[in-house]
Each structure stands twice: as structure tokens, then as C-alpha cells.
Image (cartoon, rainbow, N blue to C red):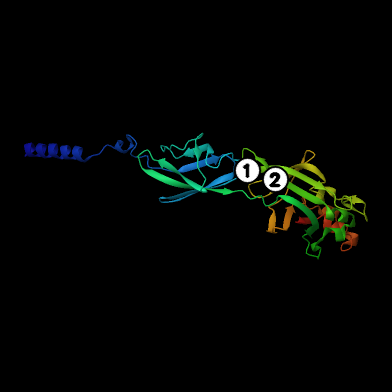
């Protein structure tokens, strides 16, 4: 009986050894390296970050570029590219892509030897703010949060008459001059006085208080504009920078520049003339818009 039991155990152990796979077997070699993704890419003249999309074998990269800064559209240089772990490609940094037709492809090979072709589309950057614009309106909204009626919106010059001369000023966003390391484009900026040759003043005549810091956020002068990735605009004049909120363009002739007027200061409210003193609106302004027209 013991002899038969020993024979059974020997056969059982041998069978188990034959059926047990090496747990590290799948990690040997490159068979497990199946990723074929493009993680990031930066091309010559590129603006902003690439949009990388993939669903199964449908893979696409969409980029925007300042075509004026590209020497040869048939030889657009790859300035940087990153692939998933273990993947390789002949399209490396320093090589070029041909966008003569508007699109091309990048082939990525996984460590396991599987290939995925990524469609790459290059769209031209359209500078929606370029040109000379006339300031047609300063518009503000205010709310002191008390719920007693000191809330609303109005043309600023109807409350602050001294700002009226600025309504014919010219704001010029020049053509794209280049892009920084983050792909943000920039160009020359200028604000000049209009036909009256006068600049806006933001001194409230009733109190003689100067509200320039709250309302004059795009001063007269020359400098540079920088288009941020969220479509806000940073304007630098005489070493001072002013950043708009996201600009709004309804058509080719109208551009709205929302600005942050700063934190409300309800401590300045004139309680003795709650509804008559415009200081009570200025100190709790929540929104400020420069409306421009061509």
C-alpha cells in the first residue's frame, strides 16, 4: 500500500511541475510591451499643446502652428516627441514631417513588434485679435451683496464722465512675432489716443478719487501682447503687465476684452448717499469690459 502511495505522489508532483508556468515568463523579452502611443509632440512653429486622441487603432494628433514661422511646409521639424514605454519610431526629434497636403502620419512600433499609424493634422493658427481696434465702450457690473438694490450694470462713462475721451482710442494687436517655449504666441501692442488726442481720466469729480488702478487696465503706450493657452491676453506696457480674462469675439468687427477689476472694497461705501454716490458702484465692481470695434 505504501509503495502504491509513493508512486501516486511521484506521478502527482511530476504532473504539477509540468503544468506550472514560469510567472516571469511574460516579462522576458519584449512580448509584454504592447503600447504604441504618442505621449507628447512639439513641432516647429507649433502653438499650444497637441491634441492626442486614440480609440483602438484609430489614432490622431491635431496641432496648430504659425505657418509664417515654418520655413518649408514639406519639412516641418519635430522638436520633441515622446512615446509610450518600449515603443519606437523613425519619427524622432530632429527629423521632419511633410505637411504639404495638410496631414501626414507617424508610425509607432510597440516592443512586441506591432505597428500603429498615427494621423497627424496641422492646422494654421488664425490670429483673431490682430488688427487695429477702436474702444467703443467701457462697461461695468457691480453688486455690493447687501441685496438693497446697489447692483447692476452701466457704461462707465455715464457714471465717470472723465473716462469719455478714451472711447475713441486705438488698440493695435500686431501680427505674430514668435512663440515662447510653451507655444504661446506674441506680438507688438500699442494703444494710442483717438482723434481728440486726449486720454481717459478715471478721477471721479464728486470725490476727486482716482479709480485708474481699477478701470484703466490697458494704458496708452507701446509694448507686447501674449496670447495665453486659455485665450486670455497678457499685455505688457512700460514694464507693467495686465492680463485679460478670456476674450470674446462675436464677429470680425467686434472684440470684447473682459478684465478683472480687483477685489470689491465695501469699506468705501457712502452710506449717507447710498444710491446717489457712484463710489458705491465703483468700489464693488465685479466685472469690467472693454468693447472694441473695427
Q: Quadrant of residue 8?
A: top left
In this view, 19 is above or below 208: above
Q: Quarter holding the N terminus? A: top left
Residue tagged 1 = 68
Query: Residue 114 at what x, y percent from top left?
Result: 36, 42
- Where is residue 126 shown, x and y percent of the image? 63, 50
Q: Nearer the viewer, residue 110 or 266?
A: 110
170 lies above or below 94: below
Q: Are marks 2 and 1 in contact (CB under 8 Å)?
A: yes
Crowding near pointer 2: few (<14 within 10 Å), some, many (20+)? some
In the rendered image, the quadrant that contains the C terminus is bottom right
Determine if residue 66 is in view: no
Looking at the rendered structure, which numbered label has been put on residue 23? none
Answer few, some or many: residues within 10 Å of disc 1's Cα (few below 14, many 20 plus, some between 14 and 19): some
Image position of 98 with respect to 149: above or below: above
Q: CA distance from mark 2 to mark 1?
A: 10 Å
For image coordinates 45% across by 46% down, the residue present is 118
Q: Nearer the viewer, residue 117 or 263?
A: 117
Q: Locate residue 150: give its quadrant.
A: bottom right
Residue at point 47% right, 42% down? Answer: 38
Q: Position of residue 81 (x, y in %)?
A: 50, 38
Residue located farthest toward the bottom when viewing the structure as drawn: 149
Judged left or right of residue 264, residue 56 is: left
Query: Is residue 209 rendered to the left or right of residue 143?
Result: right
State the image quarter where residue 222 is shown.
top right
Helix, strand or loop at label 2? It is strand
Image x and y of residue 280, in percent:
85, 58
Visible residue check, residue 191:
yes
Nearer-N-terminus badge (2/1): 1
| Disc 1 element | helix
Q: Which residue is mark 2?
A: 175
Amino acid at each position: 500500500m505504501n509503495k502504491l502511495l509513493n508512486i501516486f505522489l511521484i506521478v502527482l508532483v511530476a504532473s504539477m511541475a509540468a503544468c506550472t508556468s514560469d510567472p516571469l515568463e511574460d516579462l522576458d523579452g519584449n512580448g509584454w510591451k504592447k503600447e504604441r502611443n504618442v505621449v507628447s509632440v512639439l513641432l516647429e512653429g507649433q502653438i499650444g499643446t497637441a491634441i492626442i486622441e486614440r480609440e483602438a487603432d484609430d489614432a490622431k494628433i491635431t496641432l496648430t502652428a504659425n505657418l509664417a514661422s515654418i520655413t518649408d511646409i514639406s519639412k516641418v521639424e519635430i522638436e520633441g516627441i515622446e512615446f509610450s514605454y518600449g515603443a519606437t519610431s523613425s519619427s524622432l526629434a530632429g527629423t521632419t514631417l511633410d505637411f504639404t497636403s495638410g496631414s501626414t502620419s507617424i508610425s509607432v512600433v510597440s516592443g512586441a513588434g506591432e505597428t500603429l499609424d498615427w494621423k497627424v493634422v496641422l492646422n494654421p493658427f488664425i490670429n483673431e485679435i490682430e488688427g487695429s481696434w477702436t474702444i467703443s465702450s467701457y462697461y461695468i457690473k457691480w453688486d455690493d451683496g447687501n441685496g438693497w438694490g446697489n447692483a447692476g450694470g452701466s457704461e462707465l462713462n455715464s457714471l465717470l464722465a472723465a473716462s469719455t475721451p478714451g472711447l475713441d482710442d486705438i488698440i493695435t494687436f500686431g501680427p505674430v512675432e514668435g512663440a515662447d517655449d510653451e507655444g504661446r504666441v506674441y506680438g507688438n501692442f500699442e494703444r494710442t489716443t483717438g482723434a481728440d488726442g486726449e486720454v481717459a481720466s478715471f478721477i471721479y469729480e464728486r470725490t476727486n478719487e482716482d479709480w485708474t488702478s481699477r478701470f484703466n487696465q490697458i494704458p496708452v503706450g507701446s509694448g507686447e501682447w501674449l496670447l495665453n493657452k486659455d485665450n486670455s491676453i497678457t499685455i505688457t506696457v512700460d514694464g507693467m503687465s495686465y492680463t485679460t480674462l478670456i476674450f470674446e469675439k462675436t464677429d470680425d468687427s467686434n472684440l470684447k476684452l473682459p478684465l478683472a477689476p480687483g477685489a470689491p472694497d465695501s469699506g468705501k461705501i457712502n452710506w449717507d448717499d447710498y444710491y446717489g454716490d457712484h463710489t458705491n458702484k465703483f468700489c464693488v465692481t465685479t466685472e469690467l469690459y472693454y468693447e472694441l470695434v473695427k
